[in-house]
Image: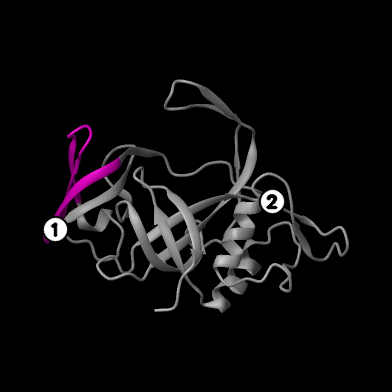
Amino acid sequence: MAITSRAKYGPRGLAKVTVTDEKIKVQFEETRDTFEVFREDAPEYKITDGKYIVSMDSDCMKIMNIIPPKGTYFGRFSHFWHKKDELPIYRSVAAKTGRKKDGGSFFVPSHLEFTAVFSITSKDYEGFEVPYIMWYCFEPGKIDPAESDIVGKGRQKVEDFLMAAGFDVLTDSIPYSENVLPELEKMVLSKKAEVAITINLGGWVDDITSAPSR
């Protein structure tokens, strides 16, 4: 049931963004590569001049995603990633070997994963969407097969996400099905919890925690 592919991405990194009525200019800081896209080929939320983490498509004709630079921001869960007019679904990821900064390597086994999307509520970035990737690790419960157990590699990250988003893993239960995401999305949205999202220098989410009262 899992999908096996996603949109192909191109350059990604910290970039200077300049906005006109019709176009958005993106200049990556590290490579100095510069691209221009039409406004309709970028996310719909309000983008102003500034520095952001930008992800282009493989043809460098579209901005696939644009998020705030390194820092901590407030936000709320918006949805699980899905294709247009489809329900959210996990995806299959093939095994791969990655490279560390020190030249070493690491192995990532094949697995299932899904993406939670958060909408920023902090001033200056309100409405920006930040993706948070997790391993899909839901199985029929050992005590009650009609409910889901969260098990295996990636379990802690999923539980931390749910707790930050207002889900009580001790008292709330997730009905088990081949794909729990549509029902889980409704449950997490009902919590309406605000979270604190910490974005690192590379533009990835380091941590999501319950937001302090404001």
**Residue 25 on the magenta span:** yes
- Image quarter of residue 184: bottom right
Q: Write the start and end of the magenta stretch as one range.
A: 13-37
Name above or below for residue 181 compared with residue 121: above
The residue nearer to you, when weighing 149 against 62, is 149
Establish if 205 lies above or below 97: below
Q: Position of residue 63 (x, y in %)?
A: 29, 49
Does residue 137 sit above or below 98 in this rendering?
Answer: below
Q: Residues within 10 Å of mark 2 (few under 14, many from 20)?
A: some
Q: Residue at x 76, y 63 (%)?
A: 176
Residue 195 image position (x, y, % from top left): 47, 68
Identity, as a three-letter code, of the amino acid under mark 1: Glu
Q: Is residue 5 magenta?
A: no
Which quadrant of the figure has residue 120?
bottom left
Task: Say whether residue 33 is left or right of residue 134.
Answer: left
Q: Distance between the residues labelled 1 and 2?
A: 43 Å
The tag on residue 176 is: none
Image location of residue 90, percent across then percent down: 61, 51
To which residue does mark 2 refer?
137
In the shown orientation, is residue 85 left or right of residue 142?
left
Whole-percent x, y for residue 98 in the image: 51, 27
Q: Main secondary structure of the magenta part?
A: strand
Q: Which of marks 1 and 2 is nearer the N terminus?
A: 1
In front of the other: 181 or 204:
204
Residue 81 in sight here: no
The disc label shown at residue 22, or none: 1
Say which of marks 1 and 2 sits in front: 2
